[in-house]
Image (cartoon, rainbow, N blue to C red):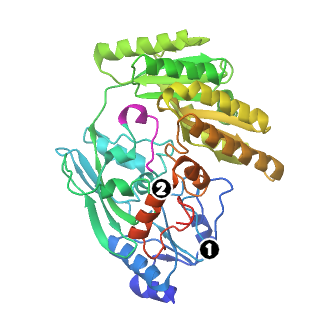
Amino acid sequence: MLIDDLRQELPDGRMVEDPGVATGFVHDEAEWAPYGTPLVVVRPRTALEVRAVVRACVRHGVPLVTRGAGTGLSGGANAVEGCVVLSTEAMDTIHEIDPVERLAVVGPGVVNDDLRAACAEQGLWYPPDPASAPWSTIGGNVATNAGGLCCVKYGVTRDYVLGLEMVTGTGELVRLGRRTAKGVAGYDLAGLMVGSEGTLGVITEITVRLRPRREAERTVAGYFSSVVAAGRAVAAIGAAGLTPSALELIDRHCLAAVDKWKNMGLSVDADVVLLGRTDAPGPAGAQEAERMLACFEEAGATWAAQSTDQEEADALFSARRLAYPALERLGPVLTEDVCVPKAAVPEMLARIERAATRHDTLIANIAHAGDGNLHPLLITQPGDTAAQERAQAAFHDIIADAIDLGGTVTGEHGVGLLKRDGLERELTPAVLEMHRAVKAALDPHGILNPGKVIAGG
């Protein structure tokens, strides 16, 4: 039996067989995404232990689902019935930080904020910063190609992965990518693994690019009477040729939820808050902040100003990060993650409002507005099946609207289970077949996270 093989192959303490403990490993944070009961949960500490698990699953034809911290929002880490769940959380060593080459080598279980803090001690910075950065792991960030607040200027996880070590679907331990600043030898297989959501291999080590520590940021805040008006400010900033280091939108529903939880007093004066930042140094930063402020005012801000109080500015961005957990306190939240061209942001926000009305669903909005990555949050009440069905209908309408506006079904959360139909709408049949061919080549036994990303894959 598989479990007997794993007991022989793995050191003591690596297997979680207690059903009560295992329940904490069976799904991520995606609301209403289905999940099954695993045969066993394993928590390896080395690449060789991961290889042993993969090879055992190949021998017995058992599915393998890899997970990090479980903070995903697409169902990508959800267990399938009778699978092995492989948790990388114990592979949490920062192996190396090289200030000359500006790179770090880390285990997949390293928490994003822990890496950022360790880099800061050496005057370096790891830019990708999802809102879940205090809890999410680098391995999970790589699996979903996570983004974050500063990605409007600095890019997403794929832009920082130089190389990685992984176990293939045939049980081979391989290294992909490089450590050098440049390199074009062969296909970019390391890049292919970023965003693959555990369907092409199990990542055991990651080499990431680092940047020098940034200048202090200047913050511009604006209040708007509607999300559409705030969207016009976003489009104006893009048209002005500005590249803020962050540009975030928070609507009245999010502000009220944060206020109810943390009593920050943000929802008293604004229906929508738009937060912009620039980290350009010296006079260039001051000029960029002034131009951003002008864009806010010209788009119809009811109030806008450049913050002179760093504590106040940080509190506003803290509210942005708190929005999702604050809304979860109100009821089940189905999270969207569409991305549209910046010029289409006002229209997309208007269509989200129409979807909310059409399906009688409360939809709150937070957004990485500067790069067109919108996160409508569809809120229901526990046990209200009819409301859940309406929310799911609105969810699919929003996906269709994003594609119609030239956008994509996911900007950073991944496809997982929730966006498979949307991916099939976005890609042509020929391109979908290319995806399936890659999957078949790297996972010929079909054991790696089956049923995720590509339907039938």
Tag of residue 81: 1
Residue at the spot x=67%, y=45% of the render? Answer: 396
Helix, strand or loop at disc 1?
loop
Q: Is residue 150 magenta?
A: yes
Q: Where does the image place residue 180, in percent across and percent down from the top left?
A: 18, 50
Residue 346 x, y percent position in the rendering: 59, 24
Using the image, tell me which numbered label, if any, was put on residue 242.
none
Q: Quadrant of residue 321?
A: top right
Query: Eyeballing the image, is 239 above or below 251?
Result: above
User: What stretch of residues is rendered in magenta?
Assistant: 145-154
Disc 1 crowd, CA 10 A, few/some/many (<14, 14-19, 20+): some
Badge 2 amino acid: Ala
Residue 430's disc number: 2
Judged left or right of residue 359, residue 291 is left
Is there any visible trace of residue 73 in the rendered image?
A: no
Residues at discs 1 and 2 in contact (Cβ within 8 Å)? no
Tell me the distance, in whole angstroms, between the alpha carbons under discs 1 and 2.
31 Å
Left or right relative to 188: residue 197: right
Residue 57: in magenta span: no
